[in-house]
Amino acid sequence: VKNISTKIIPRERILRVTLETVDPTQGQSIVIRSADNRDDFQDFSVPRRYDITEIPSGASWILSGSIQFVNPDFPKNSHVTLVAELELGVWTNPSRETIIVQRRTFDLQLGQPFRPN
């Protein structure tokens, strides 16, 4: 998330990134790990919310990591749809009410190992 404004996004204004699966039952088949392996969520069937405290003008906040399929019974070549949303506090009530300002959908597919002949 990059603040391209000339003003700081203050602590009083909600800024949140949410990651969730479209089908909650599929969320139990994947985990997300942060780049430093600190966060390891075994159950992705509930939304994962990351609250950003503030972003100075021109600064960025980065969420990085990897997503891994962990359920050995999950069928090969199956898809999990992951949605990432960016919420921002509205001007009339910035600390309590939010609107989604960006939404991205990702399809993750569990492949099969390649075995050359």
Image: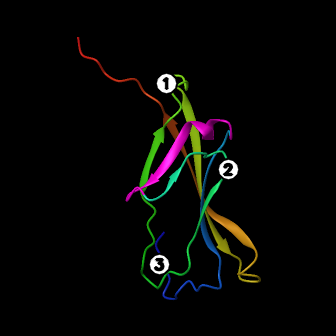
**Residue behind mark 1:** 77
Residue 26: say if magenta.
yes
Identify the residue shown where x is 56% and y is 45%: 42
Dot 2 amino acid type: Val
Image quarter of the C terminus: top left
The x, y position of residue 71, in whole percent, is 53, 31
Disc 1 vs disc 2: which is toward the camera? 2
Seen from the viewer's position, the closer of residues 10 and 37 is 37
The x, y position of residue 111, in whole percent, is 43, 27
Would you place residue 86 above or below residue 15 in this image?
A: above
Q: CA distance from mark 2 to mark 3?
A: 31 Å
Seen from the viewer's position, the closer of residues 32 and 40 is 40
Q: CA distance from mark 1 to mark 2?
A: 23 Å
First in sequence: mark 3 or mark 1? 3
Residue 109: say if magenta.
no
**Residue behind mark 3:** 4
Decide: marks 1, 2 in contact (CB < 8 A)? no
First in sequence: mark 2 or mark 3? 3
Q: Which region shows up in magenta?
A: 24-37
**Residue behind mark 2:** 46
Q: Is residue 83 left or right of residue 108?
A: right
Would you place residue 91 above or below residue 15 in this image?
A: below
Task: Characterize the local packing of mark 1: few (<14), some (14-19) or many (20 or more) Cα atoms within 10 angstroms.
Answer: few
Dot 1 amino acid type: Asn
Q: Is residue 70 left or right of residue 16?
A: left
Dot 3 amino acid type: Ile
Tell me the SS state at disc 2: loop
Identify the residue shown where x is 60% and y is 49%: 83
Identify the residue shown where x is 76% and y is 82%: 93
